[in-house]
Amino acid sequence: MDIIIGSHVSFNREKQLLGCVQETLSYGANAFMIYTGAPQNTLRSNIDDSLTESAYKLMKENSISLNNVVVHAPYIINLANMKNFDFNVSFLSEELNRCQKLGIKKIIIHPGNHLGLGEEEGIKNVALTLNKVLETDKTDVYLCLETMSGKGSEVGKTFSELKSIINQVNKSERLLICLDSCHLNDAGYDMNDFDLILNDIDKIIGISKIGCFHINDSKNERGESKDRHANFGLGTIGFDNLIKMIYHPKLREVPKILETPYVVDLEDNNHSFPPYKYEIEMIKNKKFNQNLLEDIRNQ
């Protein structure tokens, strides 16, 4: 079975989407996720159409579909609290326009933190913000609400919470969900029984609403609500469970994106290595590499 697998890659000012495709190919991947600028601030460079066209050409030559490319919204957007409502609306609208200009049709967004307002109020705020954004939006980009770990005052840690958001959004056809295996584990879902999880999703939201899947192992035991990603097969979810998720026939058309940690150089703690080439090789071979971290450090 062919799989759609990739990772987060860097979108920089000099090469933009072209650099993203080049990095993706270096990992042996056929999908990727980007931030269109730094996730911690509002600085954004203008989209260079010539670089985008060069990226499209390289993607076509290597059979990478734009359907398997996603953007992640920056962390500074918090939909669940109305304190920065105008900023959240304007900046998310801008991100949708940047996606449209790049030709990317899905943006992943965290529902946010209610910051003491309570889950019900937080969910209502997410929906109010999304309604305001979609009221005037002219793009055809889908917003994928990510499943969260439940850390702090996060909303969206259960499928029911995500469904409640979806139900309150007027243009709910524009909403999808993004699964995250680490977040699901940390929120309390049993990753040893992924079929049961998919059945729950289908009953509550609909399996057709899954637009992306972040594939991460977890450093935490089930239900600890900590959100600490581990490298593929080196956490509490484990290699075999993650492989079953990636190769699940019901998710064949869903892009799977690695957000696993960079591996720190033991001789220089300020230097670290991307793990994705080695993790993707393991995934394609369906065979766990016991020397994964050593191989990454020796690259």
Image (cartoon, helix red, strand yellow):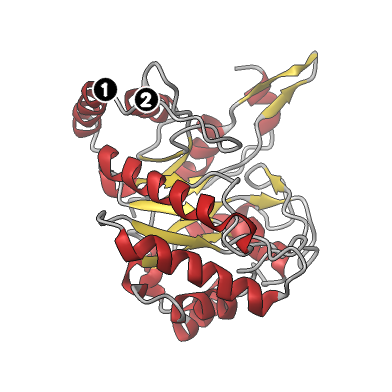
Badge 2 element? helix
Q: Is residue 210 above or below residue 141?
A: below
Q: Is residue 147 above or below residue 89?
A: below
Residues at marks 2 and 1 touching, judged by CB atoms closer than 8 Å = yes
Q: Image point 64% across, 71% down: which residue?
A: 122
Given the image, on which type of amino acid does mark 2 rest?
Answer: Gln
Horizontal side of 93 relative to 293 (left or right) equals: left
Specify the farthest residue to the top: 267
The quarter in which the N terminus is drawn is bottom left
Residue 211 seen in the current view: no
Given the image, on which type of amino acid does mark 1 rest?
Answer: Leu
**Residue 52: image x %, image y %?**
25, 28
Residue with the mark numbered 1: 51
Q: Image point 65% across, 79% down: which residue?
A: 120
Q: Image point 63% across, 25% down: which residue?
A: 296
**Residue 61: image x %, image y %?**
19, 29
Residue 8 seen in the current view: yes
Q: Quadrant of residue 265?
A: top right
How far separated are the C-alphas under marks 2 and 1?
Answer: 7 Å
Residue with the mark numbered 2: 16
Horizontal side of 128 relative to 21 (left or right) equals: right
Dot 1: within a 10 Å radius of its alpha carbon, few (fewer than 14), some, or many (20 or more) residues?
some
The quarter in which the C terminus is drawn is top right
Q: Image point 61% across, 64% down: which residue?
A: 80
Badge 1 element? helix
Given residues 270 and 250, the one toward you in this image is: 270
Q: Earlier in the sequence, mark 2 or mark 1?
A: 2
**Residue 167: image x %, image y %?**
45, 81
Dot 2: within a 10 Å radius of its alpha carbon, few (fewer than 14), some, or many (20 or more) residues?
many
